[in-house]
Image (cartoon, rainbow, N blue to C red):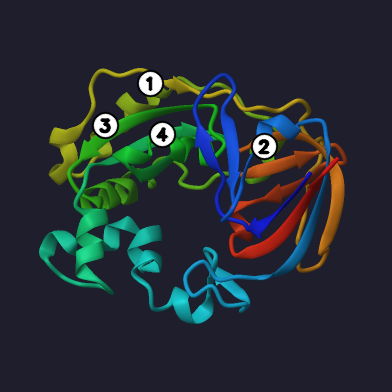
């Protein structure tokens, strides 16, 4: 079987285990169905997710010019505390910014390599946790806009991590944590503007990833350095493909790369 197209973040469906899908322009692949099979990945060209041109990918699947121009790559995406749509102030495209920023957002705790705080739109729960490879997560506050979520995250990351150690996540050297205790402990640090949105009574969400074999020591596949790679797929966690020889491939980091996949 052969598939060809531009890589974009794998779509997911929560289940036991989570189902993963690679979606191309004219085809899609349920990645779970190729576990334990040989997969050859061949890099063909770049294709910016916005302008579709064969230009080097700068960040988030976009070429450099698109990254600094389009509203979907504004600074507030990665730093939600910079959101200004609630003030009716435009960054790059106010209509788009209002659509995304002025909707319910969740501040959460997730445990993928360690306990970390993060922000996502409510509609992205539990997708965001799956993408981070978290085996457990819990909501702390639900606020009406991205700005309030952002300032809450900034306050809480003084007391808990805000980054995932992707190597620990992929080797599964992760301890279970009592996230309810963490949530209650961090309540005192929530900014005054968001305290009314604290979630008092909820439970952890547990996630099961389709992994047959975890790597002992990860080796990251870089298509610019290794344009053709072949290996046996042993697992999927976060947005990573895990291969038998300890190679891991981050689909999210390679958005905008046009590839062919040969399955044997």
Q: Up-down: is 62 above or below 165? A: below
Q: State which quadrant residue 182 falls in.
A: top left
**Label 1: which secondary element:** helix
Q: Are marks 1 and 2 in contact (CB under 8 Å)?
A: no
| Mark 3–mark 2 distance (CA, rounded to whole Å) | 39 Å
Q: Which numbered disc, 3 or 4, marks the residue closer to the eye?
A: 4
**Label 4: which secondary element:** strand
| Mark 4–mark 1 distance (CA, rounded to whole Å) | 11 Å
Q: Up-down: is 45 above or below 41? A: below
Answer with mark 3 or mark 2, whichever residue precedes in sequence: 2
- The location of residue 165, given as percent across then percent down, is 61, 44
Query: Crowding at label 4, few (<14), some or many (≥20) Cα neighbours within 10 Å?
Result: many
Q: Which numbered disc, 4 or 1, marks the residue closer to the eye?
A: 4
Answer with mark 1 or mark 2, whichever residue precedes in sequence: 2
Can see residue 12?
A: yes
Q: Which residue is mark 2?
A: 31
Q: Quick check: 126 left or right of 43?
A: left
- The location of residue 96, given as percent across then percent down, is 25, 63
Q: Which residue is mark 3?
A: 187
């Amino acid at each position: 079987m052969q598939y060809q197209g531009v890589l974009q973040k794998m779509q997911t469906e929560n289940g036991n285990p989570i189902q993963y899908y690679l979606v191309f322009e004219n085809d899609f692949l349920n990645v779970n169905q190729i576990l334990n099979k040989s997969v050859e990945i061949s890099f063909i060209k770049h294709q910016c997710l916005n302008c579709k041109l064969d230009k080097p990918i700068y960040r988030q699947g976009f070429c450099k010019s698109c990254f600094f121009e389009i509203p979907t790559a504004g600074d507030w995406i990665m730093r939600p505390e910079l959101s200004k749509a609630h003030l009716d102030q435009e960054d790059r495209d106010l209509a788009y910014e209002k659509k995304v920023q002025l909707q319910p957002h969740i501040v959460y705790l997730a445990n993928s390599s360690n306990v970390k705080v993060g922000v996502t739109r409510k509609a992205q729960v539990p997708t965001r946790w799956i993408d981070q490879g978290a085996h457990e997560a819990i909501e702390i506050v639900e606020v009406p806009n991205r700005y309030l979520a952002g300032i809450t995250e900034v306050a809480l990351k003084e007391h808990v991590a805000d980054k995932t150690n992707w190597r620990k996540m992929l080797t599964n050297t992760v301890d279970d944590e009592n996230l309810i205790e963490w949530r209650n402990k961090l309540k005192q640090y929530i900014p005054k503007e968001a305290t009314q949105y604290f979630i008092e009574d909820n439970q952890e969400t547990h996630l099961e990833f389709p992994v047959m074999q975890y790597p002992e020591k990860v080796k990251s596949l870089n298509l610019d350095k290794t344009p053709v790679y072949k290996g046996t797929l042993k697992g999927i966690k976060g947005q990573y493909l895990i291969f038998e020889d300890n190679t891991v491939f981050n689909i999210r980091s390679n958005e905008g790369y046009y590839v062919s996949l040969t399955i044997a």
